[in-house]
Amino acid sequence: MPNATPPRRNCEHSGPCGVPRAAPNSAPTPRSCSGSPPTADTSGPPQPRPDPTPAAPRPSTTARLSSHPRLLGGRSTGRRGAPTRLDRSSSTVTPTPRLRALPGPDQPPTDPTPDQHESSKGSSTVEQVGRRLRLTSAASITLRPTHWLWTDRIPAGSIVLGPGREGIGKSLFCAWLTAQVTNGTLDGLHTGRARAVVYAATEDSWERTIAGRLLAAGADMNRVFRVDVTHPGADGARTVPLSLPRDCTDLAVEMGTHDVALLVLDPLISAVDSRINVNQEELRGALEPLATLADNTGAAIFGLAHFNKASGTDVLSRVTGSRAFAAVARAGIAFARDPDADDGSCVISQVKNNLGPLDLPSLRYRVEPVTLDTPEGPAQWGRLVMLGETDRHVEAIMRQAEQHSGDGEDATDLADIDAWLASYLIDRYGRAPAADVLKQGGALGFSKAQLYRSKKRLKISSGKGDGWAWTLPDIPPP
């Protein structure tokens, strides 16, 4: 093109100067040391006027490089095969780190799902190879009926939650349930056929508490299994508590080997891996493998839970920790002490039942002492005794406590005091010196007036022998 703007080139000094390079063996062309085009020489003949047509816009560096077959493209490579990048400060092309190639048609995609057996808190996403999505026709699914470990109350192959206040016999109920399963006397799927039970407890001693409760309930101890986990360490192997979901796989194998129909977690929250935040959504991801374990083994998983300090009559919203506990459970059986019962008995009610009827009659029970022989002499343990059906319901009892709370005490305060006092006396087989009760209660912040009002609500009697003592109703002194 005759009047085209001369190409811009790099001089030997710095940036583009726009002066054509001299032909070999020709005289040097004057250049500007600043890198800018030299000034015109007005001493010679007149120069032709430049073309008035403006020069085309100079394409961007990226656009110019992208048209090059070896730069910035998916197949372009620089030094040592690395993709290239323009260094805008020096107008040179420099290598950049190699990026992971996207999966091709013959390459499986990566899996961005975190491993369920690792806590996601503070960790990066773990990629798994082999994750694929598949659709299955509903017509190909075989229907399965719901089987019941305890008819209409505890479904087999599911998680069942047992919430309630401390000290009202929840653990004694687990001992009663274990005895029924190991003797084949529970109304349900295994009636007439004894099955094994795995009992995982973290809050009580097996030697001093759990084994005695099971014997007092009449359990077949040959069919009850304590679960221990051996963990290697720098100082050798050590025994640690069950940790879920980490131990789900091994636990499923052992449960299948021993023909287990029931897994008791006393309490459920203590069996969850300590690295998992039980108040966050990650808890649900930890509980879902436990639900899978129940479904695969056909065993029911009964997990105890405590009530939190919140007020309200919605039983499941009062469970300590995340709502995930109540969400993952397919059924729920709640516990409460009936303040109107003359015998100091308690009530269990069905508060959730996704797989069966919810309007089941509540059951009433009481706790009584049992004396057993030990190598160190006789000792007493508590035993739960079922008294039959009742029209009282746990939610109605909680509502009543809300309505009748007074004297500066809310419903939570009343429940806390009553639960502590009942638990204190049950642990002492139903009877304790009044002075000790007032002293221990005072150490926890309960006033004498509060303790005496609780004594009246629980219908605790007082009598004088060696000194004044408080006794739970229908529990004779030893």
Image: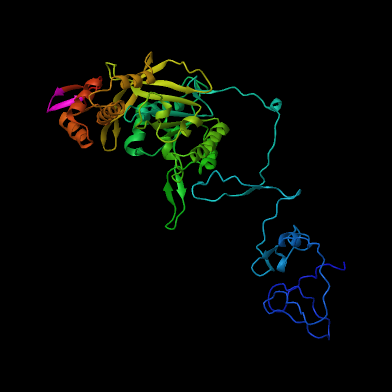
Residue at the top extreme, as displayed: 391
Residue 227: x and y in percent read 45, 40
Determine whether 266 is above or below 276 in the image: above
Check the image and report above or below for 376 versus 43: above
Please tell me which residue is depicted at 44% across the width and 58% down the height of the picture. 234
Q: Please give the range of residues in magenta.
A: 463-470
Q: Position of residue 376 (x, y in %)?
A: 26, 38
Q: Nearer the viewer, residue 265 or 212?
A: 265
Q: Main secondary structure of the magenta part?
A: strand
Q: Is residue 29 magenta?
A: no
In front of the other: 7 or 247 = 7
Q: Quadrant of residue 249?
A: top right
The residue nearer to you, when weighing 163 against 314, is 314
Would residue 8 appear left or right of 156 to someone viewing this image? right
Q: Horizontal placement of 183 versus 459: left or right? A: right
In the foreground, 174 or 244: 244
Residue 311 location, x and y as percent? 35, 27
Left or right, 139 with respect to 238, comes to right
Q: Is residue 257 visible?
A: no
